[in-house]
Amino acid sequence: RYTKMKTATNIYIFNLALADALATSTLPFQSAKYLMETWPFGELLCKVVLSIDYYNMFTSIFTLTMMSVDRYVAVCHPVKALDFRTPAKAKIINVCIWVLSSLIGVPIMAMAVTKSKGKWLLGKDGMVLCTLQFPDPPIYWDTVTKICVFIFAFMVPILVITICYGLMILRLRSVRLLSGSKEKDRNLRRITRMVLVVVAAFIICWTPIHIFVIVWTLVDIDKKNPYVVASLHFCIALGYTNSSLNPVLYAFLDENFKRCFREFCLPFRARVDQNSFSRARNTTRELVSTCTPSEARNKPA
């Protein structure tokens, strides 16, 4: 029924939506933690919530990177795109993204613990904290983890995305018609623009928290300063905002997504429209079939 949605780009979008759904599912727990200033949900949920945070971070940026590479191949190498940009290969790449993200997600789940007051900088009496317990020396491994996250979940993917879109812009400016059809060319540019907007939204929402965490880790700042703490919470909230923003971007930018979403939400209306279209098409065929013989009889031999 939704065969037009089963493209490589939409399979990547599904992977991104899955990561976003997991991230937003943790929001009630995160909100309760900040409002109650304690973690009341136990160690198991602590492990799940923290690991989902890292899974979302890595799967999202890896998926966006692959979407950018996919767009680059479609625009700059249309012949190779026939073999590379298939739904089956996109599904395999999505599985590989989750396996690769597990290299950080599984250790985070193992290290996530609940601790009482005195184990955290902003701890209060009676507080239970959901945090990471690094092996000795903990400060060293905490710093290494944050630097690795900054490099592999931010700097390297952003570099690849920038190169891909830089080459695409050069290609789009130098060639007026990318494919043999103006309609296909228009669709190609529209999808490329949609992916660019989604990538740009991700970068805008996630850059502050990545920069803030590196500054928090490497620079000697007053971590108890209320303005510093408020800035940290704002940057964290901005990262979660991206997970809620992506569905809105798809709804505004992707016509196929809008149509299929309407059909999914209003199946009766979609069936009525489809039946009306079928009746109109059948009526046209009947008119053609009845007119053709008379035209043939009127033609001179």
Image: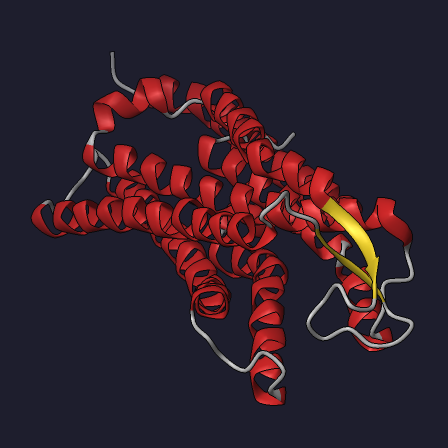
User: In the image, is residue 197 above or below residue 280?
Assistant: below
> Which one is nearer the viewer's eye here, 232 or 269?
232
Q: Position of residue 79 (x, y in %)?
A: 22, 22
* Residue 156 located left or right of residue 153: left
Q: Position of residue 125 (x, y in %)?
A: 88, 76
The coloring applied to the image is secondary structure
Query: Residue at point 45% right, 56% down?
Result: 198
User: In this view of the protein, can residue 26 be seen by the observer?
Assistant: yes
> Outermost residue toward the top?
301
Direction from residue 78 to residue 157 in the image, left or right: right
Task: Quarter of the image for the C terminus: give it.
Answer: top left
> In the rendered view, would you say 86 is above or below 159?
above
Most extreme residue toward the left is 174
Can you give x and y, in whole percent of width and height, for residue 217 in the image? 49, 64
Query: At 82% from the left edge and 77% from the top edge, which residue is drawn?
Result: 124
How many callouts does the rendering have? 0
Residue found farthest to the front: 137
Q: Nearer the viewer, residue 96 or 185?
A: 96
Tell me the quarter of the image containing the N terminus: top right
Name the residue at 61% across, 33% down. 2
| Left or right position of 11 against 181 | right
Q: Residue 206 or 278: which is nearer the viewer?
A: 206
Q: Position of residue 81 (x, y in %)?
A: 29, 25
Front position in the image: 41 or 179: 41
The quarter of the picture where residue 247 lies is bottom right
Q: Does residue 279 appear in the picture of this structure?
A: no
